[in-house]
Amino acid sequence: MELIHVMVNGAPGNMARQLMRHVIAAGDMNLIPMSMTGPETAEKEIAADGVSVRLIRPDEKDLLLDRLDTSGLAADGAKGSPVVAVDFTHPSAVNANAAFYAANGLWFVMGTTGGDRSALHETVEDSEISAVIAPNMAKQIVGLQAMLEYGAATFPGLFRGFDLRIRESHQRGKADTSGTAKALMASFQRLGCEFSADQIEMERDPVRQREEWGIPEEFLDGHAWHTYTLRSPASGAEFAITHNINGREIYMGGILDAVRYLAARRTAGPGKVYSMEDVLRAG
Amino acid sequence: MELIHVMVNGAPGNMARQLMRHVIAAGDMNLIPMSMTGPETAEKEIAADGVSVRLIRPDEKDLLLDRLDTSGLAADGAKGSPVVAVDFTHPSAVNANAAFYAANGLWFVMGTTGGDRSALHETVEDSEISAVIAPNMAKQIVGLQAMLEYGAATFPGLFRGFDLRIRESHQRGKADTSGTAKALMASFQRLGCEFSADQIEMERDPVRQREEWGIPEEFLDGHAWHTYTLRSPASGAEFAITHNINGREIYMGGILDAVRYLAARRTAGPGKVYSMEDVLRAG
């Protein structure tokens, strides 16, 4: 079997480190022992399950290109062994990294949120590569979102007259409102609920998270809990949907599937932006 | 505007009585002041918002036919003013009632559950009438069910490895497991959950319903609460869907919509069985 060569960018960040271990463990993948990092990173390398991974700052990108050349990996995804970069870096790096991947023929999975998303899509569409761009890599959440989208398209106004309440809790460091909550909110709006993004209730206080929400202590610094409640007192009805994620493990399976999906799409040609829902539909 | 003449069968049952009030209040409907009832019913008539409604036992059905004739209502749904029967009687009466409607050209909405459902469909398909047959008349629940069905068809196995738990609570008198819970269970099975109907947890004890579930006192004798929980401890994920209904009000809007849908389908010809999802899709 042809191995997929995977470069995980964003070490020493937690997502990248955890993903590296999964790539190493996957029988169909080979971890490229290099990881693009930010300009402020002082470490030169990290160890991932015994593999020493070189951290590449923005001013050292030539090292990366040299290595990709000398290792005999075809950077052009259309030829030779497939190479896929997975990006879990920083919102400020999204567009520069995409431009680098496009310029060097590296197909990629963009898991990093933020940046200029329209420009990100254009970079891929005008290039010789394709990419999976997915703000949420948890397959079950993407599937749930697709079900609600289907409902909104098929039964617009079904929940007209219902009061919507959206609550979400994330680790203290997350400043912005949950993007997933906003995405599902859009479906509920089409289902008839009057609601705006500023009504989403954000919880960032660890004490309330532990005591009122019941979030386990060890996940206070890494969780994503969401509840959407629809109430119609007049009709005696209450509906609720909850998706609570502790830690990062659930994202790993989705990322590996996205890498495999992209590697298998080389013959479909470049310039294509795939979503996580495309990955899911492929099964 | 042409009024829809509606006969609500199943008085003096609560569903029928409540529905009669809604038919009387609807500007586009006329309540036929007769209601088919069971052989054990002693009452001769009931009052619904000032309208006196004659209860018709099975041995008195000729009275009903006489009245439908003399009132100038065309029993044949294809001609004249539309007449629609709505059935909230008893599982033991489902098939006999359907045969009566079919024999006398009465289009109908069957909200009564139980009976021989295949025979029920055949009765309509072989007849000069059409019908809406819907075990659950709450539009939002039917829509939720359609969303899960879509998910199951589009992303089979999406929740493989997740543990499913289904809990439902109904009034003490309900002997069988919730049909809605079983219907949603089938979608979860296709989504990859290993689960069988005998694992559905039924609650019928009013003390636990009040104290543990928090079901309001006044709805202990009429409620339908359901929660489906999907857990994957290995991936730190928990999903939950809840639909809690107190009382019967939520069903009323769906029933009236089904009546209107059926009345508007007269030109589509007889022999058709429509579902509540068909009604929903019509908007």
Image: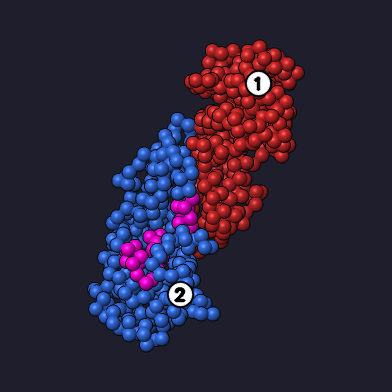
Chain colours: A red, B blue
Which residue does the image show at 40% across and 60% down from the upper left?
Answer: B136
| Residue A224 x/y as whole percent | 56, 37
Which residue does the image show at 41% across and 46% down from the upper left?
Answer: B187
In front of the other: B105 or A164: B105
- Classify A81 as above or below A145: above
Give the labeled residue for mark 1.
A75
Secondary structure at numbered mark 1: loop
In front of the other: B164 or B99: B99
In the picture, the disc for residue B161 is none
| Residue A67 x/y as whole percent | 66, 14
Residue type highlighted by circle 1: Ala
Give the labeled residue for mark 2.
B23
The crowding category of the residue bearing disc 1, from other C-alpha atoms within 10 Å (few below 14, some 14 to 19, many at least 20), is many
Residue type highlighted by circle 2: Val
- Tell me the magenta residue range: B120-148
Chain under callout 2: B
Instruction: Kindly indicate the quadrant of the structure image that contains residue A146.
Output: top right
Which residue does the image show at 63% across and 32% down from the upper left?
Answer: A269
